[in-house]
């Protein structure tokens, strides 16, 4: 339900907007039509005098795959970035290319371009400046853009001559190709020469660096190097490793010999030479012991057979003693050998230790030489790598100098156009019409917004807080509202005042106001006409009515009513120069009497003060059912506010789309602060076909026709 409610409100607001737009157009269509016609005619004239221009297009394709320096499939399939394509577009629109075309095609005296630079004659005093100005003028006719997302560039040239447009479009395309090829080859040749010069310098530097590194290695005794691993080797480095190994072996042997000698000495101390392990393990001693054992066995047999004093027994004993002496001598020799071995091993270890220490001291000196050698090796390697890279680039540059294949080509040459491409006169005519319609609509919109008046019943009631008693339509030109009231009593105009009468007098059973004042905020809002029409309406309804013209400075009622000008008026009555009966005369309808002003009256006196007007109304209240007062406007005049207080009800006249909102609000506040009784507003001079009168009336065309038909 909430969604439906919001939709209904939106539709209502949309309908209100449409109604306002339609009403505005209906009321001001003549102004809108005049503005639209004037603007459209100006547009047609301007378009008709436009010089026709022709645009021819040459198409240039950029091909990045035709790079003569491409050495692999990846480079062959290279793509141009949008930035690179924009760079080529700028190259086509370069001033240098434009100057070359100006010279090649003799455009210096071309009227089309010479006329464009004629206004800057003060700045083109030299030939070069004039040529630059002509080139800039030619470029202003050139447009280069990319065709969608392709590698195709559209080179468009616009001129008043179809042949010239095609010729210059092709000239820019061809000039771009030629300049690109020439610049490419020339650049490659210059690069090749520069590369050759640099190669000679780099080759010399690389050779010198390698020679310095070799000399230094020889002087420092560096026998090998490895630049990749950033290490170098010297003779000392090569000697240290085997010497350290030999020292370790010698120290191990010396330790073993010392151990064996210490063990042998300990064994001798415990049990003699026979207890030494090396002695026991000696083959010589083992053989001597075997011989001794045989001698001992023979001794036993000899002594048992011959006795101890027998020469044979003595010989055997001498042989046994000789063997024992030999064994002891051999044992002492073995122990002495152990001691000699230990001393030799220790001496060898000491010698190796001294040699290694000397090498270590020499390595400290050669370490600095190694670092310097490594630095020289790296410098030589870097210069050699730079030389190799430069050699490769030189080769590529030489190839580019020999191969002049362009990476761009013209795929579609410009042709003269049989019909002008601009201006598109039908389109410009249509745009002129749209602009004219917009100007007309804008004009009436500005007029509508600056009018500052009330445009609907809702606005009046919301801004003023009083009801709208009736909506009085605007009568056509040439018609007198007062006459329309009498001649067509059933018209919409007459009906609106009958509605006002019903609203002012109220419903049955309530006391109706006797003195009714009608006033307005400003002049020319229909106040006097409304007062006359309202008084006539009361009279035609059977009520005895008196119309008193209180707007003495205008005295306009006598020009509206169809009665002779009386001899005595309101001013004379208030001055005491005549009685009220002399001033009252019959009106132009039955039951209507009038007290008018004979001529405009201007005076600084308080004409209606000192109780004179109040006494006059008190006298007339008894004689008439209703008294209608035509008051002066409230803004700028004090009489209207004073007289409104004397009335039982006051009606404020508001002219549709004219009375300023601020003026109406001020007038209503004055009436309330003075103590008068503003009962409502008369909304006058409303367009009969407008739907801006809100809920009180819906003045559609059908109602308008209905009232006009009767």
Image: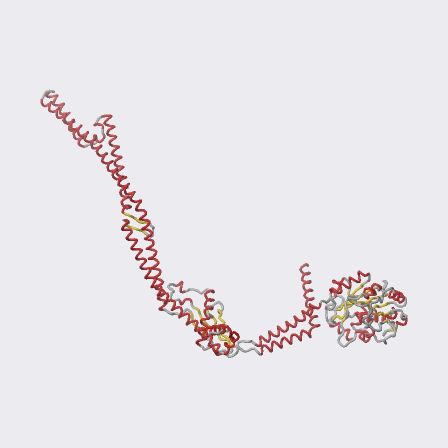
Residue 148 makes an appearance in the image: yes
Query: Foreground residue, 391 or 566?
Result: 566
Residue 634: horizontal and vertical position, in percent?
A: 79, 66
Q: Is residue 316 left or right of residue 572?
A: left
The quarter of the image holding the C terminus is bottom right
Residue 41: quarter of image: bottom right
Residue 617: horizontal and vertical position, in percent?
A: 87, 66
Please, is residue 310 above or below residue 169 in the view? Answer: above
The quarter of the image holding the N terminus is bottom right
Residue 28: quarter of image: bottom right
Residue 3: horizontal and vertical position, in percent?
A: 67, 60
- Furthest toward the left, the residue is 311
Q: Is residue 434 left or right of residue 575?
A: left
Residue 526: quarter of image: bottom right
Residue in view at x 60 percent, y 75 percent: 430
Residue 463: horizontal and vertical position, in percent?
A: 74, 62
Q: How many marks?
A: 0
Please, is residue 349 above or below residue 512 in the view? Answer: above
Q: Is residue 579 left or right of residue 403?
A: right
Please, is residue 44 above or below residue 312 in the view? Answer: below
Q: Is residue 244 left or right of residue 526?
A: left
Query: Foreground residue, 499 or 613?
Result: 613
């Amino acid at each position: 339900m909430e969604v439906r409610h919001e939709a209904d409100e939106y539709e209502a607001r949309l309908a209100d907007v449409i109604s306002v737009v339609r009403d505005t157009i209906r009321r001001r269509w003549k102004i809108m039509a005049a503005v639209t016609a004037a603007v459209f005619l100006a547009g047609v004239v301007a378009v008709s005098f436009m010089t026709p221009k022709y645009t021819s297009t040459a198409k240039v394709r950029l091909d990045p795959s035709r790079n003569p320096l491409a050495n692999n499939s990846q480079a062959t399939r290279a793509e141009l970035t949008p930035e690179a394509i924009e760079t080529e577009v700028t190259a086509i629109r370069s001033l240098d290319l434009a100057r070359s075309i100006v010279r090649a095609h003799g455009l210096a005296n071309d009227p089309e371009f010479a006329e464009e630079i004629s206004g800057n004659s003060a700045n083109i005093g030299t030939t070069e400046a004039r040529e630059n100005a002509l080139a800039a003028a030619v470029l202003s006719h050139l447009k280069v853009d990319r065709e969608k997302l392709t590698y195709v560039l559209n080179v468009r040239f616009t001129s008043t001559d179809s042949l010239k447009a095609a010729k210059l479009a092709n000239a820019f395309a061809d000039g771009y190709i030629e300049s690109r090829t020439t610049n490419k080859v020339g650049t490659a040749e210059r690069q090749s020469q520069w590369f050759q010069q640099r190669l000679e310098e780099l080759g010399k530097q690389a050779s010198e660096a390698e020679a310095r590194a070799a000399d230094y290695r020889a002087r420092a005794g560096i026998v090998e190097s490895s630049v990749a691993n950033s290490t170098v080797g010297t003779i000392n480095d090569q000697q240290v490793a085997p010497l350290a190994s030999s020292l370790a072996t010698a120290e191990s042997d010396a330790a073993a010999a010392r151990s064996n000698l210490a063990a042998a000495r300990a064994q001798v101390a415990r049990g003699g030479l026979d207890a030494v392990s090396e002695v026991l393990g000696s083959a010589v001693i083992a053989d001597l012991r075997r011989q001794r054992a045989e001698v001992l066995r023979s001794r036993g047999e000899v002594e048992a057979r011959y006795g101890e004093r027998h020469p044979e027994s003595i010989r055997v004993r001498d042989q046994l003693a000789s063997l024992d002496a030999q064994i002891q001598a051999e044992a002492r020799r073995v122990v002495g050998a152990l001691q000699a071995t230990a001393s030799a091993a220790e001496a060898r270890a000491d010698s190796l230790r001294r040699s290694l220490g000397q090498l270590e001291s020499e390595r400290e000196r050669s370490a600095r030489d190694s670092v310097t050698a490594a630095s020289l090796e790296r410098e030589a390697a870097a210069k050699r790598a730079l030389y190799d890279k430069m050699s490769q680039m030189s080769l590529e540059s030489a190839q580019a100098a020999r191969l002049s294949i362009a990476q761009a080509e013209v795929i579609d040459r410009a042709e003269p156009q049989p019909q002008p491409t601009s201006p598109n006169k039908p389109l410009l005519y249509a745009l002129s019409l749209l602009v004219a319609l917009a100007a007309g609509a804008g004009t009436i919109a500005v007029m509508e917004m600056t009018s500052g008046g009330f445009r609907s019943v809702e606005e009046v009631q919301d801004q003023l807080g009083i009801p709208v008693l009736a909506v009085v339509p605007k009568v056509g030109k040439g018609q007198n509202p007062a006459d329309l009231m009498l001649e067509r009593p059933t018209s919409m105009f007459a009906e609106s005042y009958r509605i006002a009468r019903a609203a002012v007098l109220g419903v049955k059973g309530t006391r109706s106001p006797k003195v009714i004042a009608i006033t307005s905020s400003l002049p020319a809002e229909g106040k006097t006409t409304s007062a006359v029409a309202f008084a006539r309406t009361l009279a035609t309804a059977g009520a005895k009515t008196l119309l008193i013209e209180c707007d003495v400075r205008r005295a306009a009622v006598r020009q509206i009513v169809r009665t002779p000008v009386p001899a005595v008026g309101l001013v004379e009555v208030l001055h005491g120069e005549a009685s009220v009966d002399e001033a009252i005369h019959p009106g132009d309808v039955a039951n209507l009497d009038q007290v008018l002003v004979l001529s405009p009256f201007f005076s600084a006196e308080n004409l209606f003060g000192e109780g004179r007007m109040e006494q006059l109304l008190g006298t007339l209240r008894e004689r008439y059912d209703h008294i209608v007062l035509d008051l002066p406007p409230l803004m700028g005049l004090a009489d209207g506010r004073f007289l409104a207080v004397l009335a039982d009800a006051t009606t404020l006249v508001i002219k549709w789309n004219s009375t300023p909102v601020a003026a109406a609000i001020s007038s209503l506040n004055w009436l309330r602060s003075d103590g008068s009784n503003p009962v409502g507003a008369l909304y006058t001079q409303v367009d009969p076909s407008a739907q801006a009168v809100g809920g009180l009336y819906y003045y559609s065309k059908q109602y308008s026709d209905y009232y006009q038909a009767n």
